[in-house]
Structures are given as C-alpha cells and as structure tokens.
Image: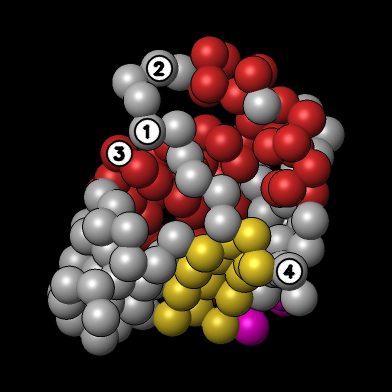
Amino acid sequence: HVHVHVHACACACSMDICIPQYRGGFLRLLGAGGMLGFDSCVWGGDEVVQLVAALEFARDAGAATAADGLFLPYNRLTDAAAPPLVAALEAGAMPELTDLALEFNEVGDAGLAALRPLLAGRLSSRLRRLGIGGGARGPP
C-alpha cells in the first residue's frame, strides 16, 4: 500500500485558488490507493472542512481517491467535524474506504450519532473498521 499524506490548504483561500496551481499532482496523488493519513496534526473542524473540500474537488474532477483508509486519530476533532465528513463520504468522496480511524479525538455522543449513517449507508458493505474512542488526548 502507498501511504499518501495530502495536506489541506492551510491558507485562508478557497479550493478554487489553492488547487489549480497543483491540480495535476494533487489529482494524481489522490487517485493513488493506500491511505490518507492525518494523525497527530492537531486538526479541528476547520481542517476537516478543508479536507472534505479537497476530496469533493477530486471527486468532481473525476478523480475520486482510491485510498481505502482515512486516518485522523490524535487530533482535536469534535462532534461538529462528523456531519461534513459523513456527508462527503456518503456522497462518494472516498468510494474505496474500508478503514476510518477517529480515535483519540473529542467526539462525543452527537458525533457518534452523526457517524451512524456510515454503518447503514452506501459504505456499510465496504467499511470494515470505524475506530472511535480512546478519549481526547494530545499527540503521542
């Protein structure tokens, strides 16, 4: 498996500004298999929104990622991060997803409820692991 790290646009600009400059390389990297790893990045909801925008950009460009894993443990994700992530995954942003790791974040009951569609929706037959829990904790 290829381990791909794709960094969401850290600037205040929109994807329309950030992505075109690197469009070819970006779509080539996202088209690769393997996993997208964003563990210990101290990400919160804003970064998840950027990630979702990047995944949707690739999908809309005909290059939905072939990655089968999305790893977001050891961040600062809260309940608010779950709905946009679930919406993007349910809309086909990561059609090959089998492993979603959200351990060691700040996701509570509302976030767990928002994740529930992944267990019954279009990814339910493919998703083998949904990692949650571990409590909120800083990077290892």
Q: Which residue is mark 1?
A: 10
- Judging depth in this view, the residue of 41 and 14 nearest the camera is 41
Q: Position of residue 14 (x, y in %)?
A: 45, 18
- In the image, which is nearer the foreground, mark 3 or mark 2? 2
- Secondary structure under tag 1 reads loop
The colour style of the image is: secondary structure
Q: Which residue is mark 3?
A: 46
Locate residue 41: give its quadrant.
bottom left
**Residue that sits furthest to the right in the current view:** 62
Which residue is found at the position 16% from the left and 76% from the top? 137
Quarter of the image containing the C terminus?
Answer: bottom left
Q: Which residue is mark 4?
A: 2
- In the image, which is nearer the foreground, mark 3 or mark 4? 4
- Of labels 1 and 3, earlier in sequence is 1
- Of labels 1 and 4, earlier in sequence is 4
Whether residue 118 is visible to the viewer of this picture, yes or no, is: no
* Labels 2 and 4 touching (C-beta < 8 A): no
Kindly identify the amino acid type of the residue bearing the numbered disc 2.
Answer: Cys
Q: Residues within 10 Å of mark 3 (few under 14, many from 20)?
A: few
The CA distance from mark 1 to mark 4 is 24 Å
